[in-house]
Image (tube, rainbow, N blue to C red):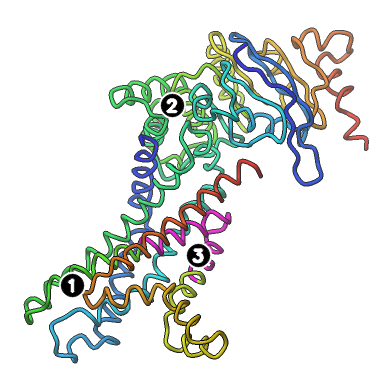
Amino acid sequence: MLLQVEGLRKRFGRRNAVDGVTFNVAIGEIVGFLGPNGAGKTTTMRMIAGYLEPDDGRVRVDEIDVAEDRARAQAHIGYLPEGAPLYGEMTPWTFLRFVAEARGLAKNEVKPAVLKAANDARIGDYIDQPIDTLSKGYRRRVGLAAALIHDPMLLILDEPTDGLDPNQRQSVRELIKRLGADRALILSTHSLEEVEAVCTRAIIIHDGAIVADGPPAELAKGHADGLFGAFRKLTGAAEAA
Amino acid sequence: MKSLLAVYRRELLSYATTPIAYVFVAVFLFAIGLFTFQVGGFFESRRADLTGFFAFHPWIFMVFLPAIAMRLWSEDARSGAIELLLTLPAPTWALVAGKYLAAWTIAAIALALTFPLWVTVNVLGDPDNAAIFTAYIASVLMAGAFIAIGSAMSALTQSQVVAFVLAVLASFLLTALGLPIVLDAATGFVGGGAAEALTRLSILHHFDAAQRGVVEVRSLIYFLSLAALCLGFTWLAVDARRGA
């Protein structure tokens, strides 16, 4: 298993944001994280990416413990943070070059890596425009390109299609499918149809714990509204309360 | 090391592509000129030296250098870009050092642009150039300490304004400890010995000898250790985000 997550816990103040999350992801899997806002999706992804340290539990990427050997584990991870933060005064070109250099790519590898990532994320003609002047869709693509630049085995994408128009969403979904074929990929989303369209597996998180884990079609089985019915049944209590 | 250099270059690029560094350098040069000529009495002193120039450095630095350092961490925390930095396969100290060195470089460039004054005193008279050189070295090191204070305060908050105010305050306290008025007041409270020791901790005390051209290894070590201490604090504050 490329990614092993074991008993992950994180508290913020008195609240258990993530409360004992365990799952594994193999290469070739595209896992969709589903759950209401505040369920613990982003916190879980941040802990896997090595941005937050868990209070308890373990994350191993290719058998490397993230807590023990963070930098070596992070070398295998590509991460798109929530909202795709970037340096707005830079251009996609200078920004991607920075990420490639900061990730320690060899001098002669930097340019090809930037061109390939920019091409994969379809940044195209906008590569020399200041990021601040780009549309939300293009900024998201620049964030995706940054996550891809070192050709990581594990991709963690926090709401990669949030705020995109239908065309942009479609092209990002195609990209995700393409990328997920030969690596492990986790994405979080609020779109159930997205999970059905691109994910091989769905994990539903509620109140910091996993309440369902399986192929989207299987989770949908037995519910009149399919995956939506399952999602409502498993997480709807929060809305009612 | 590669990540340190990459962060250093990125920060420099960011200073170069946003107005802040240009505005800073211009206003800094204007302020330092104003103080040197108007308050320091550069011409009236009728001496070919730069003591009237260097004497104002601690006071000008404590306002200007926090303005350069304030964005180092607070801006990334606000925009979320810090998440990108902290998920790079790089040790936190390399990120801290890269950002710090970039801000220090801007300060050093601003200081280097005061060279016409040095040329002027050489045209007007026959100054002790070795002493001036020494004072410049001490000034660059002192700038490094002020920038490090600014970096530490910037790591504490998402607001550049708060980072700026905190850094000016901390810089002022550390500098003013060396003022005679503080020494006199402190003597009354804690006795002469302790007050004297307190003075020795001040930036002013250590820059005082240096600006007259006397290099004291103690003072150089003081500036370097003050910078190291503040950078260590920055490192802790940035790493604390991972546990937050």
Label 2: how many residues lie within 10 Å, few (<14), some (14-19) or many (20+)?
many
Mark 2 and mark 3 residues within 8 Å of each other at the beta carbon = no
- Which one is in front in this view, the residue at disc 2 or the one at disc 3? 3
**How far apart are the alpha carbons under marks 1 and 2?**
53 Å
Specify the quadrant that holds the N terminus of chain A: top right
Position above or below: A153 against B14 = above
Give residue B63's position: percent from left, percent from top.
Answer: 42, 71
Q: Which residue is mark 1?
A: B132
- Seen as rendered, the residue at the extreme front is B193
Q: Which residue is mark 2?
A: A123
Give residue A74's position: percent from left, percent from top.
Answer: 52, 27
**How far apart are the alpha carbons under marks 3 and 1?**
30 Å
Q: Residue at x 6, y 79 (%)?
A: B126
Q: Which residue is mark 3?
A: B164
Give the residues drawn in magenta, as a range: B144-168
Numbered disc 3: secondary structure: helix
